[in-house]
Image (spheres, helix red, strand yellow):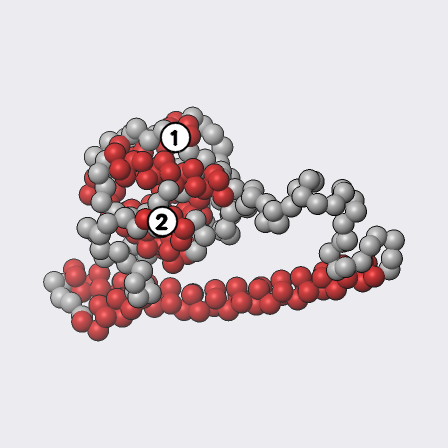
Amino acid sequence: MAGSRTDLLAWLNDLLQINYTKIEQCGSGGAYCQILDSIYGDVPMSRVKMNAKHDYEFLANYKIMQNIFKTKKIDRPIPVERLSKCKMQDNLEFLQWMKKFWDSNYGGHVYDAVARRKGVPLEPPATVAPLSTRSGTGLSAGSGGRAGGRTPVGGFRSGSAQPNEAVQQLQAQVRDLSGHLEGLEKERDFYFEKLRNIEILVQTQLEVLEGESKDDVTLREIQKILYSTEDGFEVPENAAVDEEETF
């Protein structure tokens, strides 16, 4: 049975002695690396960026993770591009697989997660895609024109009244977009809570039936729908690694 979001977070926080509040925070890759370290004990945790905020730090964590998969001959593709976008569904699916893998391979030994991180204090990662350190414009001081001689965004030069108006318009657009985003997040949380309540009811009833050596096909189908993913998302366990998702 696939683990629920709440159960997975409780397990993750207890195992790694962290304080994640959302599945999306696993997208930095640090927690995945330390789950593997709890099993094998030889992940180079000094190189794992548990407080990763930049894209190159995220990718460095996944590179370490891929090396462990290769060394330990773990036949499972790592969807780096999707996971590093910190989307809940992608990371939920992968964390469910990680929990199942941990259950099958953890030796029951005592694992001191804080000591393995050498006591480095942790801040829960953000739940948005990492900050990029790459230049998006491709412009530099020597790419044409002298410094300070460029026309500001909006097409007006400093000293005129128009730039202030342009900035105010942009700020108003940002406020509108922020309000719209907040509304979408509330709507998302509203429907997610409904689904979560259904999930709890179904899971509780199935546990009761299992205790009585019974089953309910309808409840199983409802649970299957709750845990289903988009077509083409799941990858067969013996499938080859997607070249586009590796370094």
**Residue at x 22%, y 61% (from the top left corner):** 207
Of 71 and 90, the residue lying toward us: 71
In the image: residue 141, left or right of residue 40: right
The amino acid type of the residue labelled 1 equals: Met
Residue farthest to the left, as pictured: 213
Q: Residue at x 52, y 42 (%)?
A: 54
| Secondary element type, mark 1 | helix
Q: Quadrant of residue 16?
A: top left
Q: Quadrant of the C terminus?
A: top left
Q: Which residue is mark 1?
A: 45
Q: Looking at this view, is 18 or 73 the one in front?
A: 73
SS assignment at label 2: helix
Mark 2 surroundings: few (<14), some (14-19) or many (≥20) residues within 10 A: few
- CB atoms at circles 1 and 2 under 8 Å apart? no
Q: Tell me: residue 193, above or below residue 42.
A: below
> Can residue 82 be seen?
yes
* Residue 63 spot, x, y in % from top left: 37, 38
Residue drawn at x 14%, y 63% is 212
Residue 29 locus on image (x, y percent): 40, 42
Real-space Cα distance between discs 1 and 2? Answer: 23 Å
| Picture quadrant where residue 18 is located | top left
The part of the image, by quadrant, that contains residue 164 is bottom right
Amino acid type indicated by mark 2: Glu
Mark earlier in primary sequence (1, 2): 1
Can you say whether 210 is above or below 71 in the image? below
Residue that badge 2 annotates = 245
Dot 1: few (<14), some (14–19), or many (≥20) neighbours within 10 Å? some
User: In the rendering, which numbered label is found on residue 137?
Assistant: none
From the viewer's perspective, is residue 214 above or below residue 35? below
Q: Position of residue 202 (x, y in %)?
A: 28, 66
> Residue 44, image x and y in percent?
36, 29
